[in-house]
Image (cartoon, coloured by chain):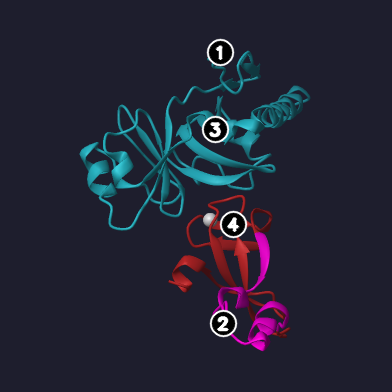
Chain colours: A cyan, B red
Amino acid sequence: MASLIARSPLAGQAPLVLGRLRLAEGRPGPITSLARLKDRPLDALLEAAGLSFPAPNSMVSTETHRLVWTGRDQAFLFGPPLEGLGAACAATDQSDGWASLLLEGPGAEEALMRLVPLDLRLTAFPQGRTARAPLNHMQAILMRTGPEAFTVLVFRSMAQSAWHEIGTAMRSLAARAAIG
Amino acid sequence: MRITCPLCGTRDRREFYYYGAEDYLHRPAPDAAPETWDDYLHLRDNPAGETRDLWYHELGCASWLVVTRNTVTHEISAVELVAEVSA
Ligand SMILES: [Zn+2]
């Protein structure tokens, strides 16, 4: 067996800093998709880990895990897989399937709202809110991780496109700011 | 045009994919008469008024939806999950 080199979807991509915004690759670690199965004790297992199945457009976090709603009866678990998960739901490893992009800085939502048809201002999309929503043509998972911070997940194959799109939005904002 | 996904909330039309009439949910039995299959596959009403169609929240939560829409006023009066309608 050849020795393969593990590369993150945006390996080698230096953070992009423009004005007060910073775009960088995130390293989410293990991602597991949990899909409910009838009569399986998923809720009990989550509860034992201090988690609960998140409502649509939201996430539930502990020190070690983050559980993000991603669809009807489906959520993504960020963090080490929980013991017994395979018997409690349909669990699939998604770790290498997604690219994670972190956008931080005051007005980060202004850049994202050029690409996402949602109101992402803090009042409408506060910390802890998430959304399955398009980033232009890409099927993204959006998380508000802080007052000035978002995590955007896209399919791994679209990592460069997402980076380019968000970078373009950042450049537009910076250019607009430069001319006053 | 905005569609209110029962799970995601009110979203822009670009997030949704249109499939066709709700008739697709009423698949005949495999041994149904040829006329019944012909009806299912090819014959559609074209109402001036209320119609029920299947839409897919493609760029959102990936749920299939039944959208009740008025072709005269363009009003959308209901959006339901196919999973609940056909359960
Ligand atoms: Zn939806």
Q: Residue at x 42, y 28 (%)?
A: A30
Regarding residue B82, the answer to whether it shows in the image is yes
Residue A164, percent across and down? 71, 27
Q: Check the image and report above or below for B56 versus A69.
A: below
- Which image quarter: residue B36? bottom right
Of the two numbered discs 1 and 3 in the rendering, the one whose residue sits closer to the viewer = 1
Mark 4 Cβ inside 8 Å of ligand 1? yes
Query: Would residue B45 be found to the left or right of residue A99 on screen?
Result: right
Spatial separation of the CA atoms under disc 4 and disc 2 = 32 Å
Q: Amino acid at mark 4?
A: His
Residue contact at pointers 1 and 3, CB within 8 angstroms: no
Kindly report which numbered mark, 3 or 2, lies closer to the viewer in this rendering.
2
Measured in 3D between alpha carbons, the distance from the residue under mark 3 to the one under mark 4, in whole angstroms, is 21 Å
Q: Is mark 2 within 8 Å of ligand 1?
A: no
Write the start and end of the magenta stretch as one range: B17-44
Structural distance between the alpha carbons of marks 2 and 1: 54 Å
Among the 4 quarters of the image, the one containing residue A58: top left
Amino acid type, label 3: Gly
The residue indicated by pointer 3 is: A97
Check disc 4 and report the residue beneath it: B57
Where residue A77 sits, quadrant-wise, is top left
Picture residue at 60% right of the left edge, 60% below the top: B56
Instruction: Establish if B3 lies above or below A99.
Output: below
- Which residue, given by chain and number where applicable, does mark 1 sit on? A2
Say which mark, if any, is on residue B31.
2
**Location of residue A147 in the rendering, given as x and y in whole percent from the top left corner:** 47, 32
* CB atoms of marks 3 and 2 within 8 Å: no
